[in-house]
Image (cartoon, rainbow, N blue to C red):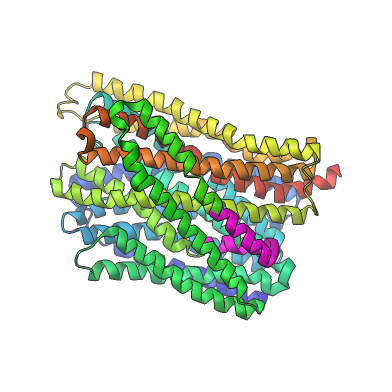
Amino acid sequence: MGATSQLISVISGGIGIIFTFFLVFNILEKSSGNDVMQKLSKIIQIGARSFLFSEYKILFLVIILFALFLLIANSLSMALSFLLGSIFSVLAGFFGMSIATRANARTTHAARSSLKEALTISFNGGAVMGMTVTSLGLMGLGAVFFLGGGNTELMSGYAMGASFVALFARVGGGIFTKAADVGADLVGKVEANIPEDDPRNPAVIADNVGDNVGDVAGMGADLYESYVGSIFSASVLGGIAFSIKGAIFPFFVASSGLLLSILGIISVNYYIKKTKDLKPEKALHFGTYTTAFLQGIVVILLSRFFLGYYDAGLIVILGMIVGILIGIFTEYYTAKKPVKELAKSSPSGAAPLIINGLALGMESTFFPILLIGIAIVISFNFYGLFGIAISSVGMLSTLGMSLSIDAYGPIADNAGGIAEMAHLEPYVRERTDKLDAVGNTTAAMGKGFAIGSAALTALALFASYLQVTNISLVDLNNANVFTALLIGGMLPFLFSSLVMKAVGNAANLMVEEVRRQFKEIVGLMEGKADPDYGKCVKIATNGALKYMILPSLIAVIAPILVFLFLGKEAVAGMLAGTTASGVMLAIFMANSGGAWDNAKKHIEEGNYGGKGSLAHKASVIGDTVGDPLKDAAGPSINILIKLMSIVSIVIIPVLMRFFE
């Protein structure tokens, strides 16, 4: 039964890949517009590909070295599993981003005809990312489980490979995109008083490249890691609780979610085509709720068939509901009444705006943490640690649909930038702005979803760590454990500090370069000369590659050092501390940054003086402060807490052979 079941998960992933190719061909057959639009899109494609190849050179060196370590310390099978997880994660991010950078100009051109056509192309471009991540994740993990004869230890190697790639993609991509964004905004909008995405701004192409490497490839790698980690940990704990049926149950939940995500993507396209007075957010919500509803019915039946009870299916549904609710609360704090209240403080200057934005982010942690806590308590009371793990799988089971909506945002953003730079008719930018406004909301919701899923995944991985190290009790009366708990609580702050300093240092270089070009290139401000876009892309690339190494090392080194000095129980304490502080810090940073961004857009719509006013300049500063919070440090914490758990699961048992 186990072998057949894993083949089904591999087949489901294969169906997802086939559907992805259908989406790709459908996108590529569309026109990418006039010569100027094609040129701009090509520059963005080359910049994004150049950055990823430069990043992969460093990443592959790290991966090969770590694979050799696993070969020596563990086994050839573990090393190969690690390599497969790394390669599939790289492929998912690269393929999804490649299509996103080709969908941008096609979305712009479609916007010249209708909002419907533009939404269809941008959404399907995001769906390529969603389907690639879930299809390769499920297919690879299922293949490792099948070829390894049901050896769950090998799946930990696959999950760790995914985690390594995710950390580099998120940290490096986040530094790149925010260095470019900060430079473009501070000099272009505040100092030169020119519009966003103005072609005279040398950093504008780097900003558009950053949207893809950070919010498409980076987000995809982040959720790929969560997806793989949740299935792996649930399979391990399910095998302990229910033998082989419990081990394969999470794979079937993920398989049904993938197939129903395909149906959800098709339903969104149908909704867009048939609706007369189209509102983009309603079309996207329709797909989300349709997929979740159908998945809820299926998991109830799967639970009854595999485990003999319906309540495991209810726990999966609980995870799905919590994920949706976290997204709703995130939308409230980053796009609804609190944002309008925040914008009211902008006429008084940047300081009150920043103070109120920080307070908003702190307040916004309450409901998501409460929801996650409720899910943990209910799940644990039904099925113990396995219950927590399957609620995490439930939250991520329809990732194919939810990531499609998230990845659509950067495509719409790029489309607006191309419309501005190509000097298209004003109505084209108005249409792309409508898509971009929805994209900003979906991106904020996606970050909330990613944080919530990271919390449950990290807790499930924590349970797996206790299993592999034979720890029955984590005693806070133990001085070593409590000390490690404090160290773990500190690490997300240290990690965030390093990432934000990296953004600041790279942004300084970007600001200097943009100022230099405005000053030295004759005729640039008059629109009679072209800026050197390539120099800004190179600055962002070099800054990201230079500064991403140190924060990335924390996740790998910290568990090893704590084990060597304080013991295996202390590692458990450290993981608990990192998860607790990291989740709250990530929510706080993501929502403060998202609120500042949308407060700026609220002012740009004509409120409080509109563009060029004191309120607008204050909001640009607030948005700039929020950029590294919501798009670099905050999302990277998701990976920190998961990678530390995965490293502990794989490495600590190896070290125990030598030191215990």
Relative to 163, is 440 on the left or the right?
left
Question: Most prominent secondary structure in the magenta stretch?
Answer: helix
State whether residue 631 appears in this view.
Answer: no
Residue 370: x %, y % from top left: 55, 52
Residue at horizontal 65 percent and vertical 59 percent from the top: 233
| Range shown magenta | 371-396
The percent position of residue 606, horizontal first and vertical second, equals: 20, 39
Q: Residue at x 76, y 57 (%)?
A: 467
Between 496 and 554, the one nearer to me in the picture: 496
Image quarter (top left, top right, bottom left or bottom right) of the C terminus:
top right
Left or right of 550: which side holds 616? left
x, y (%) of residue 102? Answer: 31, 52
Residue at figure coordinates x 21%, y 40% from the top left: 421
Most distant residue in the left direction: 425
- Looking at the image, the residue that sits furthest to the right is 660
**Relative to 384, does residue 492 appear above or below in the rendering?**
above
